[in-house]
Image: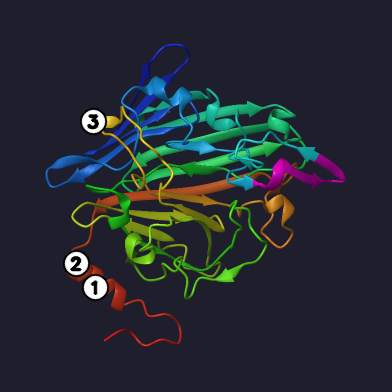
Amino acid sequence: MTAHMIDHGDGLMEARLEHGDALASILNLGCVLRDWRAPLGGRLAPAVLGYADPRAYRGDGRWFGAVVGRVANRIAHGRFRLEGRDHALPLNDGPHHLHGGPDGLSRRLWAMETDDAASAVRLSLVSPDGDQGYPGALALSVDIALGRDGLTYAMAAEADRPTPVNLAQHAYYNLGPGDVRRHVLRVDAAAYTPTGADLIPTGEVAPVAGTRFDFRRPRALAEADPEGAGHDVNLALDPARDTGEPAAEAWAPGGLRLRLWTDQPGLQVYDGAGIGEVAGGLDGARHSAFGGLCLEAQGFPDSPNRPGFPSIIHGPGAPYRQRLRLALDPAPAAAETDGAWKGRPEQGEAAPA
């Protein structure tokens, strides 16, 4: 187990974590997961999209690998009302506020210290009252460790007055060759939050049954979305699920499998349809549409304006906490995949013959 720092100048630092044959690299700019690799077929296979030049993240508009906030996802029209006061936030997604705004937490240089013995890093930041329009000062910490159980995140925030907090880890995963439409996805979610064309929730929580958002059984993204419309949806994770089991898993045939455990109520599934053309990736890669899959554990989008959604308001006596665990291993063989399908009938359904 090792953790050591690399100074890229102008305050930009990188922590390189190693445990066994796995490695991960974390930037202090927005807590970015710049690189994560795991053994596959006698080599270290990359699992996330990232830039070869760490300085490229300063101008990144795709949130590659970052922890986004104060509030991940969208707030309609950049407005919400809290304790009798209206709050206006900067708009950076057409008429809406996205991922904490144009100068959100993902744009900041966090303080960073490493723990060599644990192959871990702690990042901390104070966001002042009024930052990007949000009320209250917010003291944040993100602990990231690479170990036997994979990559773990412990996120915490303490506010001096009530304020919305909803952090999300925004890595783009690509677990094998080609684009992610070949990836197989399973999510323990029987419902989702429908949106309008602008991706603002309607306030409804609807069943996924019969929609392209039904991943209760593993299926390829292309199978779920044969017309290539793209996925960018918040799935409502089953509150009664077994938290000892992964809430989601994705794999590329012949590549890696990612398993995800979370204590959050939602998971944003974004298939990277809007990535565009990106040069200068790790190992000389070029990224384009459907080049990476985001699985963003989070509270529900636009929660401050949706009283029926789980609250994301935190303040004195009500700190914010999030735990996330991610694990990589070789993807299951086709026969094992078939068995997983047949072994997970929905309630009231017979297993397929």
Q: Residue furthest front?
A: 227
- Within 10 Å of disc 3 (Cα), the crowding (few <14, some 14-19, many 20+) is few
Q: Secondary structure at mark 1?
A: helix
Indicate the quadrant containing the C terminus: top left, top right, bottom left or bottom right.
bottom left
Pick whichever of labels 3 and 1 is earlier in the sequence: 3
Residue holding disc 2: 334
Q: Is residue 1 above or below residue 227?
A: above
Question: Quadrant of the rendered structure where residue 218 is?
Answer: bottom left
Q: Position of residue 129 (x, y in %)?
A: 74, 29
* Residue 26's disc number: none
Q: Camera-side residue: 35 or 147?
A: 35
Query: In the drawing, does residue 105 fall left or right of residue 203?
Result: left
Marks 1 and 2 in Cβ contact (< 8 Å): yes
Query: In the drawing, does residue 245 fall left or right of residue 103?
Result: left
| Residue 137 shows in this picture | no
Residue holding disc 1: 338
**Which region shows up in magenta?**
75-86
Q: Position of residue 201 (x, y in %)?
A: 63, 57
* Circle 3: residue type: Asp
* Circle 1: residue type: Asp
Query: In the drawing, does residue 288 fall left or right of residue 75?
Result: left
Residue holding disc 3: 283
Q: Position of residue 48 (x, y in %)?
A: 33, 40
Q: Secondary structure at mark 2?
A: helix
Tell me how far mark 3 sits from mark 1, CA to CA.
33 Å
Query: In the drawing, does residue 264 fall left or right of residue 39?
Result: right
Residue at screen point 35% across, 39% down: 146
